[in-house]
Image: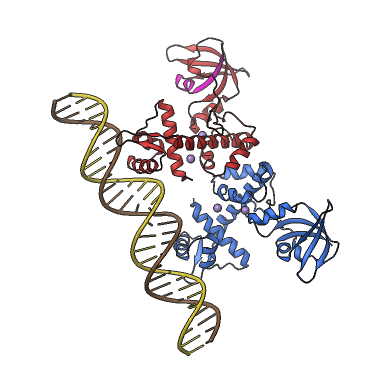
Chain colours: A blue, B red, C yellow, D brown
Amino acid sequence: MFTETEENYLKAIYKIAQKQGESSVNTKAIADEMGTSSASVTDMIKRLSEKKLLQYEKYYGVSLSKDGQKVALNLLRKHRLWEVFLHDSLGFSWDEVHDVAEQLEHVQSDLLVDKLDQFLGFPKFDPHGDPIPNANGSFTFRNQMPLSQVRIKNSKVYILGVRQHDSSFLKYLNDLKIRPGQTFEVIQFIEYDKSIKLLSKEGDQIMLSEKIADAIFVKSNN
Amino acid sequence: MFTETEENYLKAIYKIAQKQGESSVNTKAIADEMGTSSASVTDMIKRLSEKKLLQYEKYYGVSLSKDGQKVALNLLRKHRLWEVFLHDSLGFSWDEVHDVAEQLEHVQSDLLVDKLDQFLGFPKFDPHGDPIPNANGSFTFRNQMPLSQVRIKNSKVYILGVRQHDSSFLKYLNDLKIRPGQTFEVIQFIEYDKSIKLLSKEGDQIMLSEKIADAIFVKSNN
DNA sequence: TATTTTATTTAGATTTGTCTAAAATTTTAA
DNA sequence: TTAAAATTTTAGACAAATCTAAATAAAATA
Ligand SMILES: [Mn+2]
Ligand SMILES: [Mn+2]
Ligand SMILES: [Mn+2]
Ligand SMILES: [Mn+2]
């Protein structure tokens, strides 16, 4: 239906729009996300515009059409299902799944997606805690907050996911045994640099900077 | 490392050489296998020759180098492992696996191949009975013969695989409940058209033309 | 408001993989 | 052994995706 590159552009635009909370996306942002030149982006958005996958207003950026969103959401769905497979079935660690899923997401077969979804037990979240769109493109919502915003001492926090997916960040958390499904107690807030100290079930104390704590999503029990 | 198209050419050349029992492969054969023009093949073999993946003698065809064979065998390995996954884990029927495996085989990740192999229990044959090369490129050999060559009446035949993979042929066999792992008794040979009659365990009688019987591989217990 | 900085588009070029048509070479057959 | 048929190569073109450099427009700032 669409080329791998077209799909990647649509996904990039979708992600930028999400992050911004604003559907209009400019050329530079796409170029940065895709790691290409602005000139290449201009070429591509012209093509995508002709195919009615986005609205393009010269010099003022683009926004995805209904069709464009559908493609992006389907790609996101496939990406995240594959990440679950790699992690849960094949035993990849959560810092290893993304790059491979980036390739697998482009395999074209509706039957494959359906069967994979079923095989995995219709998971609602990927190994990083991101929601997996269903076949209609709708997500499961859940309440979550950045760990940095937990301000009640002795709170029990349940790790739900992370904001960033870069391998070095995930490896760092892995070493600290911080990953979705784990529970910790917040035992200290350091005011002057806003860092936070956790206690693991095994009794280990873990010190996290504000920057790190801000990139971890938790469910907080009181 | 190599493009998807380069990989497909190398695989095509490998397969033709195998079928021929002769390593030198001509342009026309490659063009037919790939569904492209001879001119395109000439372009591509020049590139593959520059990359030392094959030896090319103008007007007299090509033969794969050691490196070229390695790429082809690795691709074959991935293709067949994915077919096992699709069939055994996801429940695809054997006529549905090939086209999807044709895409999955190009995903680049040695870790993925290793983990998949392990997850599947290091299978030695794919759903069509074709041997899966191991990480070093060597196959498991087994004794098999075309069903058309079984000439002893009341032989028990055990289905091992098929010669052709086209969907319509596999669907036809599926309807007759002929697939790897099944056992039949040969109850009749018709001389004038060399067709053959089988008896299934369920008591069904199945009539097969010589053409069909020639494309089915079996293990024969006397 | 005028100027500088930043973003965007255009122009022209390159690589990959493909095609058709024409020319060259090899193979087959008379 | 020559003529016809088949195969292979070359030439020239095209679409997709990219680049750099130059031109243009918008946004920021003095
Ligand atoms: Mn990912
Ligand atoms: Mn991708
Ligand atoms: Mn196959
Ligand atoms: Mn392929």
Kindly indicate the quadrant of the structure image that contains residue A128.
bottom right
Could one spot residue A179 in this view of the protein?
no
In depth, the one of A49 and A193 nearer the eye is: A193
Q: Quadrant of the C terminus of chain B?
A: top right
Residue A117 lies left or right of residue A52; in this view the side is right
Residue at x 71% of width, y 62% of height = A212
Relative to A197, residue D24 above or below: below
Kindly indicate the quadrant of the structure image that contains residue A17.
bottom right
Q: Across the whole image, how many numbered discs are drawn on residues? A: 0
Residue B148 screen position, x and y as percent = 48, 17
Residue at x 47% of width, y 36% of height = B72
Residue B7 screen position, x and y as percent = 46, 41
Residue A147 lies left or right of residue A16; in this view the side is right
Relative to A180, residue B192 above or below: above
Residue A58 screen position, x and y as percent = 46, 70
Tell me if residue A79 is in the magenta stretch. Answer: no
Could one spot residue B25 in this view of the protein?
yes
Residue A71 screen position, x and y as percent = 55, 55
Residue extending farthest to the right is: A154
Relative to B211, residue A9 above or below: below
Tell me if residue B218 is in the magenta stretch. Answer: yes
In depth, the one of B109 and B87 nearer the eye is: B109
Q: Over which residues does the magenta segment extend?
A: B209-222
Kindly indicate the quadrant of the structure image that contains residue A172.
bottom right
Relative to A46, residue A137 above or below: above
Residue at x 48% of width, y 72% of height = A59
